[in-house]
């Protein structure tokens, strides 16, 4: 059984050992064991950090809060990258692959998905809902193109409500 499943511990993902099975009389597979994740093309951590820094700078420049006010734009790690929020609504994410996940107004989904480098977003093998697009890293390589996609994301933000 060793080597057929993987378990996550403090050091990361590793193959199971017979010791992992101890204490689980109802099964021989540890509770947290899972199949090895498929190999997927991922960018370097540097690509993601660079894109996230560019997104952060462009959103901050467009935001321009007054002195003493906090910015309505925030970010946090999600989806293997860094996601950006306007208030409580996620508007974009610098993904681990170096691509940009962007949320646009759902009524413009088809029009924007036809742009070069853009496509409906997929996550976990499923297509995400209308308004979620993946923009290839080459299509947001310069700040002008990236800023244009972020403007579209900000414009589409008001038509979304935070889920509760």
Image (cartoon, helix red, strand yellow):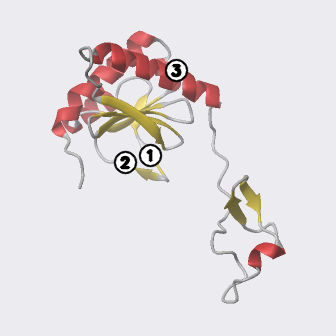
**What label sits on residue 122 in the rendered view?**
1
Q: Nearer the viewer, residue 92 or 134?
A: 92
Which residue was labeled with disc 2? 128
Side (left or right) of 163 relative to 145: left
Residue drawn at (37%, 36%) of the image: 133
Place of residue 25 in the rendered image (x, y in percent of width and height, measured from the top left): 70, 89
* Residue 102 seen from this side: no
Label 2: state its secondary structure. Answer: loop
Residue drawn at (27%, 40%) of the image: 88
Query: Does the residue at mark 1 contact the one at mark 2 (Cβ under 8 Å)?
Result: yes
**What label sits on residue 138 in the rendered view?**
3
Q: Nearer the viewer, residue 70 or 53?
A: 70
Place of residue 76 in the rendered image (x, y in percent of width and height, measured from the top left): 44, 38
Residue 81 position (above or below residue 23): above
Label 1: state its secondary structure. Answer: strand
Distance Cα–Cα, label 3 vs label 2: 22 Å
Side (left or right) of 162 relative to 101: left
Q: Earlier in the sequence, mark 1 or mark 3?
A: 1
Distance Cα–Cα, label 1 vs label 2: 6 Å
The answer to which quarter of the image holds residue 144 is top left
Query: Does the residue at mark 1 contact the one at mark 3 (Cβ under 8 Å)?
Result: no
Q: How would you rate the neighbour count of disc 1 (Cα within 10 Å): few for under 14, some for 14-19, many for 20 or more?
A: some
Query: Does the residue at mark 3 contact the one at mark 2 (Cβ under 8 Å)?
Result: no
Place of residue 9 in the rendered image (x, y in percent of width and height, measured from the top left): 69, 59
Taking the view exactly as shown, the residue that stands out farthest to the front is 68
The answer to which quarter of the image holds residue 151 is top left
Q: Earlier in the sequence, mark 3 or mark 2?
A: 2
Distance Cα–Cα, label 1 vs label 3: 18 Å
Q: Earlier in the sequence, mark 1 or mark 2?
A: 1
Q: Quadrant of the N terminus?
A: bottom right
* Residue 62 seen from this side: yes
């Amino acid at each position: 059984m060793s080597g057929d499943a993987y378990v996550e511990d403090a050091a990361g993902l590793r193959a199971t050992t017979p010791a992992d099975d101890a204490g689980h009389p109802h099964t021989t597979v540890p509770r947290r064991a899972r199949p090895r994740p498929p190999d997927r093309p991922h960018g370097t951590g540097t690509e993601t950090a660079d894109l996230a820094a560019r997104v952060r700078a462009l959103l901050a420049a467009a935001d321009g809060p007054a002195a003493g006010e906090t910015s309505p734009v925030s970010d946090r790690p999600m989806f293997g990258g860094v996601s950006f929020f306007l208030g409580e609504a996620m508007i974009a994410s610098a993904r681990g692959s170096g691509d940009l996940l962007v949320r646009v107004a759902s009524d413009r989904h088809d029009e924007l998905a036809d742009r070069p480098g853009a496509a409906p977003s997929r996550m976990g093998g499923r297509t995400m809902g209308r308004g979620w697009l993946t923009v290839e890293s080459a299509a947001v390589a310069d700040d002008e193109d990236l800023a244009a996609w972020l403007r579209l994301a900000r414009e589409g933000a008001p038509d979304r409500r935070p889920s509760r």
